[in-house]
Image (cartoon, helix red, strand yellow):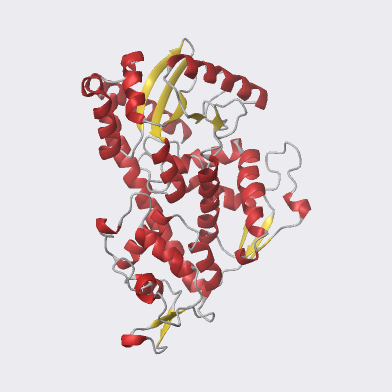
Amino acid sequence: MSNVTRFSEAQRLISLTQQLFPSIHHAIAYGSAIREQPGLYSKDSLKKPMVDLLFIVDDEKQWHTENLKRNPGHYSWLMQKLGSEGVCNVSCHLGIGVHFNTLVKLDAKTTAKYGVISRTNLEEDLRHWRHLYVAGRLHKPVTHLSDDGLISTALAPAQTQNLAAAIDVARLLLPERFSSKDLVSVVAGLSYHGDIRRGLAEDPKKVQRIVQGSWSELYSSLILETLLLQANDKAAEIQTPSDSALSVGGESPSAGANASWVQSKSAAAQRALLARLPLSLLSSMASRVLETVVPEEHMKSDCLVLGEALQKFLSLEEYDSHQSLDKALYSESTVAVRRIFRKMGLLNAKNSGVPNGRTSLVFDPEIDGNVANGAIAQVMRSVIAQKVNKASICQAAAGVVTAGGEKSFQYVTAKMGKAFKSK
């Protein structure tokens, strides 16, 4: 789809959403109907893919109340009976905070699946990767259904943080030397590792198709606008390729793909990257290393206490005095931090005369960064896969309840057909 065609389609979808639905803070179109995925559909195919839409609203309960009056047929019989409160309860307690209506006819030529999420829930996922569901989708190019084609000003900071976190995770998973294409491919695939639909009701070549079909935009958002900012930060310990290697080179589908990056894999560099990770991801990594679940009482409404503690921990060179020691290090929620970093090879301990026989924590520059990096990457892959798997199971379960049996069967059958064709 050319830029002109995509703009025309975006304007048409903006008009449709404004006509058909209650007020929306921001709307996004994504998926193969909007973004080309080479080889998925033939140019002569008469069958058009379903349009995927995401509506970000200020008050989801109020929005569903109004939408049930306007568009009751978009909801299953059960959801109509339960009303807006029931819709929200299912999406938040059975699902992961997004309600989807699928196989909805918007007009004679447009069938859509649209999801509804509150601005608060979206921002939390973008900043903290609580579910890595919508945040993962926004690692890839989407079409913002706004007059200027950009994300709303209110959501922009959270999305910038989301992309920066994806780059940090990719760097922790990649070796010392990597290409721009390596990094883009890792980022594009983060939200698919562990998805229960993968290989069954999802195209197994999806990541490859996304990277190939949206290379220019992925390269611009992830490399030119995000990774280059890190390269200008001395703490990032990464060398920038030459300007010629980074040149976009017009419309070439592989422009800049082979630009070679070199990053430090020292323990200090790993700590710097870890300190910037989303709080929920850090907390889940801690739980995995400790082989225990973080108690609910250590959770806050807007962040995870353990994740915060880890961030503070990683950003300090050494605790060599007892100033704020009890508060920063030995509080109930962070007492296990020492064990976490010893296990991950990032920490040595020594007795520094701290009161009550406690051990101060020293980040030893002689620690083998390669050993540490291997442990970090292993834990991170496992945690991300588990997070994505749980979100996909919850959302699939919620989808069966909210869409009803007939629509669920039609949707899954179409997905499986697309996956089978791709093999």
What is the quadrant of the N terminus in the image?
top right
Query: In the displayed image of the protein, which residue is found farthest to the front?
Result: 323
Residue 182, percent across and down? 59, 52
Q: Nearer the viewer, residue 220 or 55?
A: 55
Residue extending farthest to the right is 244
Residue 379 appearing in the image: no
Q: How many marks?
A: 0
Which residue is situated farthest in the top direction here? 108
Instruction: Tell me where residue 188 appears, x and y as whole percent.
Output: 52, 45
**Which of the two residues, 296 or 405, is positioned nearer the viewer here?**
296
Q: Quadrant of residue 149?
A: top right
Residue placed at 42% from the left, 59% from the top?
380
Q: Is residue 383 left or right of residue 49?
A: left
Which quadrant would residue 252 be assigned to in this image? top right
Q: Decide: is 355 above or below 172.
A: below
Left or right: where 123 falls relative to 176: left
Q: Please provide percent x and percent y for residue 247.
A: 75, 47
Q: Position of residue 59 (x, y in %)?
A: 37, 31
Q: Is residue 197 above or below residue 162?
A: above
Q: Nearer the viewer, residue 239 or 253?
A: 239
Who's the residue at 28% across and 25% down the image?
A: 84
On the question of residue 90 being in view, the answer is yes
Q: Residue at x 27, y 63 (%)?
A: 292
